[in-house]
Amino acid sequence: MYQAQFMLKLGFNTNSPDQLVFSNTRNNFYLINVPNERMRNVQKRNGLKRITVHGLRHTHCSILFSMGASIKDVQARLGHTDIQTTMNIYAHVTKEEKKDTADKFAKFMEN
């Protein structure tokens, strides 16, 4: 909330649907390396596993699929015009899903 109020004082309305997730004090794009540098600092200070900002996008997509979200919902959420982009690039299979698939196959073979 503080950031939104700060930006409003600077004359920028951040309640737009086109609002950037990471914006500088002019409500414009950061230099390409800034978000990852800031994330790396936070991760280092808190002993967290390293992940890039773009890596969060992949993780988000994988979690949506493992929650049972439809491919069309994930496609729309990620803003892809082509569903193949969603499937080819972002549909990572989680460890639980791999194990579940193996268990289902083993059970099928027993019958």
Image (cartoon, grey):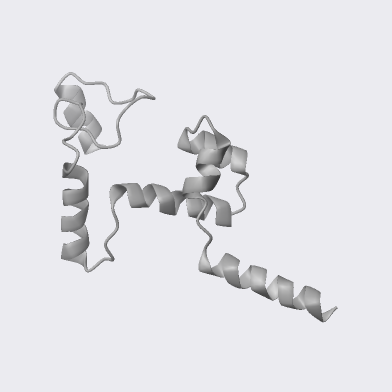
Residue at horizontal 35 percent and vertical 52 percent from the top: 55
Left or right relative to 102: residue 34: left
The quarter in which the N terminus is drawn is: top left
Position of residue 74 measured from the top left corner of the image (x, y, whole percent): 54, 41
Compared with residue 27, is residue 21 higher up or lower down, i.e. above or below?
A: below
Compared with residue 59, is residue 7 higher up or lower down, i.e. above or below?
A: above
Compared with residue 59, is residue 95 higher up or lower down, i.e. above or below?
A: below
Give the quadrant of residue 73.
top right
The quarter in which the C terminus is drawn is: bottom right
Residue at horizontal 68 percent and vertical 75 percent from the top: 103
Residue at horizontal 20 percent and vertical 23 percent from the top: 8
Residue at horizontal 28 percent and vertical 66 percent from the top: 49
Left or right relative to 68: residue 86: left
Compared with residue 63, is residue 5 higher up or lower down, i.e. above or below?
A: above
Q: Tell which of 11 and 27 is nearer to you.
A: 27
Q: Can you name the residue that lies furthest to the top here? A: 11
Q: Can you name the residue that lies furthest to the bottom here? A: 110
Left or right relative to 33: residue 71: right
Position of residue 85 measured from the top left corner of the image (x, y, whole percent): 50, 39
Position of residue 36 measured from the top left corner of the image (x, y, whole percent): 21, 49
